[in-house]
Amino acid sequence: MGSRSSHAVIPDADSIRRETGFSQASLLRLHHRFRALDRNKKGYLSRMDLQQIGALAVNPLGDRIIESFFPDGSQQVDFPGFVRVLAHFRPVEDEDTETQDPKKPEPLNSRRNKLHYAFQLYDLDRDGKISRHEMLQVLRLMVGVEVTEEQLENIADRTVQEADEDGDGAVSFVEFTKSLEKMDVEQKMSIRILK
């Protein structure tokens, strides 16, 4: 009985669940979190609302993750958009791969979509490639002051060189994917609390 009234609180809950793969219980938890972040009860979140999330405030890529909620320069994200981004971090479960209908779109939490999400955190100018400059910017955010600028430049050069198979001086999505083929992206890009 209680779940029916909770279910009614989330508009288009069934379609959001189908698209994101979240369970009803997870969707309700996420909706509760969304409403808590939306302190002024606007029905959407702004960048400032998302900056309230402590884990993003201390994450070196926090600003870039926040930006991913606002594609195409929009200034607000509604609940379905919020959940779509978070779906990339939903753990991959056996039933996700077993029941995949080839006619349906690939799940948002698939390896390919997780990698695409990560790739976009590096590809600042959205040109489909990660340049040496973009790699250097990410390294600066992640490493802090313990490493000299020269060391960071060497790491950026080496990283781009190793992944750049076509010799164009940048890393494409295909090259990025190939360079991470041995990494367990499905687990490293998962947030268990969303299960």
Image: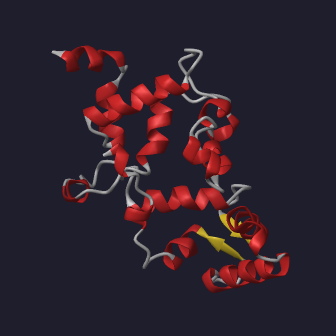
Q: Is residue 70 left or right of residue 92?
A: right
Residue 105 visible at all: no
Task: Answer with the quarter of the image where residue 44 lies.
Answer: top right
Residue 152: which quarter of the image?
Answer: bottom right
Task: Tell whether 187 sits left or right of 173.
Answer: left
Q: Residue at x 30, y 46 (%)?
A: 195
Locate the N terminus by quadrant: top left
Residue 27: where, in percent of width, then height? 34, 33
| Residue toward you, 24 or 73 | 24
Residue drawn at (69%, 55%), measured in percent from left and top? 126
Q: Is residue 19 above or below residue 119?
A: above
Q: Mark yes or no: residue 128 visible.
A: yes
Position of residue 5 measured from the top left corner of the image (x, y, whole percent): 25, 13
> x, y percentage for residue 123?
67, 60
Q: Nearer the viewer, residue 140 or 85?
A: 140
Asked which colour scheme the image uses, the reply is secondary structure
The residue furthest left is: 1
Left or right of residue 18: residue 70: right
Name the residue located 26 percent from the left edge and 38 percent from the top edge. 23
Q: Residue at x 70, y 37 (%)?
A: 73
Asked if residue 90 is positioned above or below residue 134 in the image, the reply reads above
Numbered disc total:
0
> Where residue 46 sits: x, y (%)?
64, 29
Question: Residue lying farthest front?
Answer: 146
